[in-house]
């Protein structure tokens, strides 16, 4: 196949994501998402940031990541946002003026050409990009309408960042802003562990808690929002597409497409650790995304499955997942 540049498709998994995000905003929750690689989150959230600062005067969006390269480099969250704003300014009636176009500090409005000072009576909304690697307080003191945390698997000091940054989303005790965090787990590291802790204990960070319908027999547990690889997956089996022309996913076909690719990868992968990482980047359920078994003398598929069972099983199995077939 080949990629064609055109108007973006809007498919069912994206529709549900927007509905869930709006529910969080309406009810005072933050949102944490475990997603598979190439899930489209950076594209969607970049456009969301552009829309926010274009439509709401005198407010800021903060983009945060462990490393600024995830934000301001070409193809990063803030880079996408900047390109969308330039499109609005150049080709639509919604021009606000660009007072500052720096990737790390992007301000809409006008400035005095003689002094270079931004006119605070103009639109004056901003998108600020911060690196938290050595400074979890990078966003402190900035009044934010929205905070977006990119690449959570690399965000080692996320808890410290949350402790000092959440007050910027409040006026007194009233919540006036929204925090959204997302990432792909995959390979284990310190940031990955922090991500996992917050994902499986969402209430500790004021994140919306979801019934864990994704992990096996774990519906009596809670977690964050999960975007499975098989949901909204391009591909087909015997001519039947995993996503139809109207954007509706056929999960049965999506699972078969994913498993066919896995069998191919498993047959040609030299180490089991590499195969684990491949599955983690394209996880079908959260426990697989956070699987931490690494290559050693005892590594096997059985060990990985046992680890997942320890993570998700409960003595009280209120639900057993499956479906009846005649």
Image (spheres, rainbow, N blue to C red):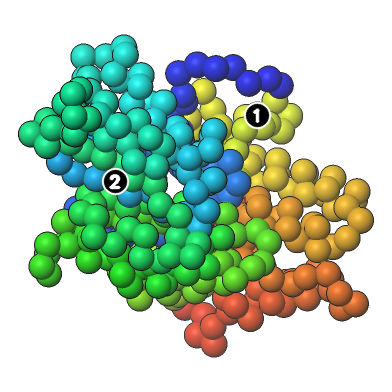
Q: Is residue 223 visible?
A: no
What residue lies at 91% left-to-right and 48% top-to-bottom?
Answer: 268
On screen, residue 120 above or below 139: above
In primary-sequence order, the first of circles 1 and 2 is 2
What residue lies at 32% left-to-right and 53% top-to-bottom?
Answer: 147
82 displayed left or right of 168: right
Q: Position of residue 90 (x, y in %)?
A: 31, 14
Q: Secondary structure at mark 2?
A: strand
On the image, which quarter does residue 29 sit in?
bottom left
The answer to which of 98 and 39 lies nearer the viewer is: 98
Q: Position of residue 203 (x, y in %)?
A: 34, 73
Q: CA distance from mark 1 to mark 2?
A: 41 Å
The answer to which of 132 and 26 lies nearer the viewer is: 132
As drawn, the residue found furthest toward the front would be 114
Q: Position of residue 68 (x, y in %)?
A: 50, 49
Q: Is residue 159 visible?
A: yes
Which numbered tag is attached to residue 279? none
Q: Position of residue 33 (x, y in %)?
A: 45, 56
Q: Secondary structure at mark 1?
A: strand
What residue lies at 64% left-to-right and 40% top-to-bottom?
Answer: 253
**Mark 2 = which residue?**
61
Which numbered tag is attached to residue 240? 1
As drawn, the residue found furthest toward the left would be 121
């Amino acid at each position: 196949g080949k990629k064609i540049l055109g108007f973006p498709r809007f498919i069912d998994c994206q529709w549900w994501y927007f509905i869930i995000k709006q529910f969080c905003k309406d009810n005072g929750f933050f949102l944490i998402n475990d997603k598979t690689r190439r899930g489209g989150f950076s594209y969607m959230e970049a456009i969301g940031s552009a829309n926010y600062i274009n439509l709401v005067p005198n407010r800021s969006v903060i983009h945060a990541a462990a490393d600024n390269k995830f934000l301001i480099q070409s193809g990063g969250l803030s880079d996408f946002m900047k390109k969308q704003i330039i499109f609005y300014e150049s080709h639509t009636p919604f021009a606000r003026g660009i007072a500052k176009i720096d990737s790390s500090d992007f301000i809409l409005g006008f400035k005095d050409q003689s002094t270079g000072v931004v006119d605070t009576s103009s639109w004056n909304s901003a998108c600020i990009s911060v690196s938290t690697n050595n400074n979890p307080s990078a966003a402190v003191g900035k009044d934010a309408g929205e905070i977006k945390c990119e690449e959570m698997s690399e965000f080692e000091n996320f808890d410290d960042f949350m402790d000092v940054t959440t007050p910027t989303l409040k006026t007194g005790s009233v919540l006036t802003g929204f925090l959204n965090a997302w990432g792909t787990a995959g390979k284990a590291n310190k940031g990955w562990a922090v991500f996992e802790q917050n994902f499986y204990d969402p209430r500790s960070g004021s994140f919306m808690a979801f019934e864990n319908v994704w992990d096996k027999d774990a519906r009596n547990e809670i977690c964050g929002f999960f975007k499975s690889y098989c949901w909204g997956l391009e591909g087909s089996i015997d001519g039947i597409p995993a996503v139809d022309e109207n954007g509706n996913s056929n999960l049965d076909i999506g699972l078969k497409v994913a498993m066919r690719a896995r069998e191919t990868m498993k047959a040609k992968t030299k180490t089991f650790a590499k195969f684990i990482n491949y599955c983690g980047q394209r996880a079908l359920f959260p426990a697989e995304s956070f699987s931490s078994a690494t290559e050693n003398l005892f590594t096997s598929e059985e060990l990985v499955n046992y680890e997942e069972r320890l993570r998700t099983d409960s003595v009280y199995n209120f639900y057993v997942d499956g479906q009846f077939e005649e």
